[in-house]
Image: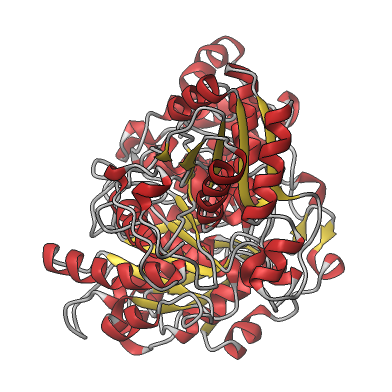
Amino acid sequence: MRAISPQKLGLKKKMYLNFTRDPKATRSGFGDALVTLGKKYNAKNKSPKIYAVCADLTGSVKMDKFQKAFPKQFVQVGVAEQNLVTVGSGIAAMGKIPFVSSYAAFMPGRCWEQIRTTICYNNQNVKLIGAHAGISVGPDGATHQALEDIATMRSLPNMVVVVPSDYEQTKAATKAIARYKGPVYLRLTRSATPQFTTSKTPFIIGKANVLKQGKDITLIAAGPLVFEAIKAAAILKLKHNISATVIDCHTIKPLDKNTIISAAKKTKRIITIEEHQITGGLGGAVAELLSENHPTLIKRIGVNDHYGESGEPQELLTKFKLDAKNIVKEAVKLCKR
Amino acid sequence: MMADIVREDIITSLLHAKSGHSAGPLGMADIMTALYFNILKHNPKKPKDPKRDRFILSNGHTCPVLYSVMANAGYFPKKELLTLRKLGSRLQGHPHRTSLPGLETTSGPLGSGLSQAAGMALVMQREKKSKSSSIPKVFVYAGDGEQNEGNHWEAVMFAAKEKLSNLICITDRNFIQIDGNTEDVMPLGNLENRYKAFGWDAVTIIGNDMKQILASLNKAYVHHKKSSKPLAIIALTVPGKGVDFMENDHTWHGKAPKKGEAKLAIEELHEHEAMLRGNWYNTHNKKNKPIHTHKKRKIKNNKKTKLNSKRSKK
């Protein structure tokens, strides 16, 4: 795929996609953008504005560069996730923008009520960064593979949920959530995944990116699996003569209703793809939206009421049927209905 | 005496709310009065002044006492205390920051107040101009029962590590929680020693003795000049203090007084107030009278209760 130009695959020109770079993890995009933000806000304001708060996983969540550059704006709370988010709430109460981070399995996994009361109901400007989400965490196994975080965060009033799809988009998302005033959950992944967006690719919170227009089916994906959806769309065209719309739905809340409803009207079939339980995540959100507004045939691809396990990321994507091959299979099935 | 007015307002607002917590707020009334009228640097007219001292109520269920001192200090009209827990009220059953100006945070779920306060104190410490420059203080009021929560102790460790000497945590050591005595439910033992073991400075005081309260809080206010450790004040308080039949009875933790009970309670508070009062009423601002007084006076004029005649003699 790296050799093929995006336009040959029918991808929109104004999305400025590019497949020629090496894979990179979304968490790295966050780490790099955070340093840029630190510099930018320190130059603009009299006192520091950006704080990074971490629970003993500084290297893993890529806060190490920020820690080195701005030691006075870095806070270590130790292995204590409830303290992590509540200290974050206190820092936000002082007019700062704290980015608090741990593995998604632990934050929001172990401190949901603190997030609910002291951040969301309290409406504090805290940015929650859940790293190592999804089964692509790999060898660490099910305990460390958060598959329910979108559901628990999406149900909280005041919360915004963003799931960026690659390195560059994560950078754009990190900057965008810093500008946005209010609680945000940003979901990141561990392993290096294909890069396809560029610094020119548009990113607006709440506005999904339509990467490709098709007429037979719509593939809505979030996170690095957007790339699997792009691959699947190429295969569908080539082997099955099915033309697919591909939507990168990077914001799960607020969901881009117009884009999704108009795609449903046009293609009449929808597949959602995510590294999350099929209940409560992107699939759940899309199903809720469409069943109320424009009932449409939907297939939700995700982890189906199951925990993950140890293995290499690609092995796990195959085993849990989240890869392009399975998306193609489901799309063909759905198109026959 | 101010504390008696605060207590009366607690009883009256709880009576109107028909539910809520009685014992805790009554026990805390003395310290809360001292904080809002003697210790904290705050301005009810400018609740967002960046230089203000912060007060965080961690045990949010005791908010009737917070609302009462806030109203008496002038954050909102006193008659609004009668809307406690009612639909559309700014006085939510547990405090909600964005509902009422002057509240520093939202609380109710226990054990999370100290860590938010630590976050605030941390930013003040990190961003102070020079070593000697004075920074605001962060006072936390936490219950003893809530110290069963792990979150609280995570914050205790964090505050010691970050040397948050402008952070003062007052523990309402009244030995009751919903299911009974704290030492039966989940023993906390000697809290002063516990805090010291966690790297804090700690003192124990009688939390219903105004002289001791003021002495220790004034000391606490300049504590950061002498020590780099956060300070814990273990305040031994009597739950239900001021109302005979509520004192030391854990069944009063989570219920509001009924009409007759409230009447008895207020009469007792009046007697205590009268004992201390002298000509206090004459010399003080009239707005500091308990919320029910105007209404009550009309009725009392007809009935001429014993209490009233006592008052008029003075």
Tell me which residue sits at (76%, 63%) in the image. Answer: A319
The answer to which image quadrant residue B84 occupies is top right
Q: A43 or B83, which lies in front?
A: A43
Tell me which residue sits at (27%, 57%) in the image. Answer: B52
Tell me which residue sits at (34%, 89%) in the image. Answer: B226
Q: Is residue A117 above or below residue B233?
A: above
Residue B245 in picture, x, y percent from top left? 77, 44
- Residue B138 shows in the view: no
Residue A232 in picture, x, y percent from top left? 57, 49
Tell me which residue sits at (31%, 86%) in the image. Answer: A68
Q: B50 or A266, which lies in front?
A: A266
Q: Is residue B178 above or below residue B234?
A: above
Residue A120 in picture, x, y percent from top left? 50, 46
Q: B2 or B69, which lies in front?
A: B69
Colouring convention used in this rendered image of the protein: secondary structure
Which residue occupies the extreme right position in the image? B184
Q: How many marks?
A: 0
Q: Quadrant of the C terminus of chain B?
A: top left
- Residue A230 shows in the view: yes
Residue A111 in picture, x, y percent from top left? 62, 60
Q: Is residue A129 above or below residue A273?
A: below
For this view, does A181 lie left or right of residue B11?
left
The answer to which image quadrant residue A168 occupies is bottom left
